[in-house]
Image (spheres, helix red, strand yellow):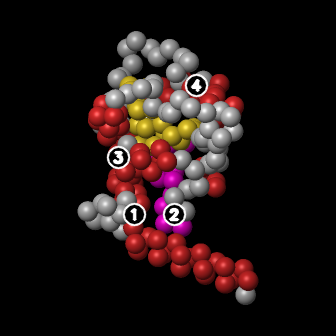
Amino acid sequence: IWLFFHPRQEAFSDGGKRSSLFRFALMNNTWPAHFSPTSIGHDLPPTEWRHDFWHSKFCLVVRGDDPASRSLSRAIHAGCIPVIVSDYLPIFSPPLRRTLNLEDFSIIIQEDDFLQHPVGSILDLQVLEESLLKEKIRQLQIAQQILCPDHPESLFVPAILKEVYEASRQMKKKHG
């Protein structure tokens, strides 16, 4: 599967106004017939959902009613390159910002670009250089070690300790 995106159908706490624009933008458009296999839509049986998700190259992570997204952590855990459509997640909710650089292992699409050209902004992924994709996957594997406590070579605890240490150092500098 080249791209995976199966958002929930119910509205978010904002009544679904703004967040629904992002969640349904791809589903309201037609994909080119010759395009790589994708898994986009609703109502996928759980076993098929898991299979498609874990076997996808890219996983779409769209903004919801707040900057954070469970789909980002799911994509990282599955080893699927996150394609983030959110202007705020990289600013307000990057995972372990002192340890990881979100842009190293994901692709970020600006919200307005996505809303204006949802299919085109995704199709642009096809022209990414193979060397860039290999580096994103390598960095994603590092992110998995850092963010997934159940990873066989997990670095989760040292990463959390580093984050706490760096945050406390920053607080001490700020407050003397």
Marks 1 and 3, the one that precedes in the sequence = 3
Instruction: Say which amino acid is labelled 3.
Output: Ala
Instruction: Say which amino acid is labelled 2.
Output: Leu
Residue 146 bears which disc, if any?
1
Mark 1 and mark 2 in contact? Answer it, CB < 8 Å: yes
Magenta segment includes 163: no
Q: Position of residue 172 (x, y in %)?
A: 67, 84
Q: Secondary structure at mark 3?
A: helix
Spatial distance from mark 2 to mark 4, Cα to Cα? 29 Å
* Residue denoted by label 3: 78
Q: Give the residues in magenta.
A: 98-108
* Residue denoted by label 2: 96
Q: Which quadrant would residue 44 be assigned to in this image?
A: top left
Which residue is outermost to the bottom?
Answer: 176
* Residue denoted by label 4: 25
Spatial distance from mark 1 to mark 4, Cα to Cα? 32 Å
Left or right, 103 with reference to 115:
left
Marks 1 and 2, the one that precedes in the sequence = 2
Q: Position of residue 47 (x, y in %)?
A: 29, 34
When the figure is inspected, residue 96 is found, relative to residue 64, above or below; the finding is below
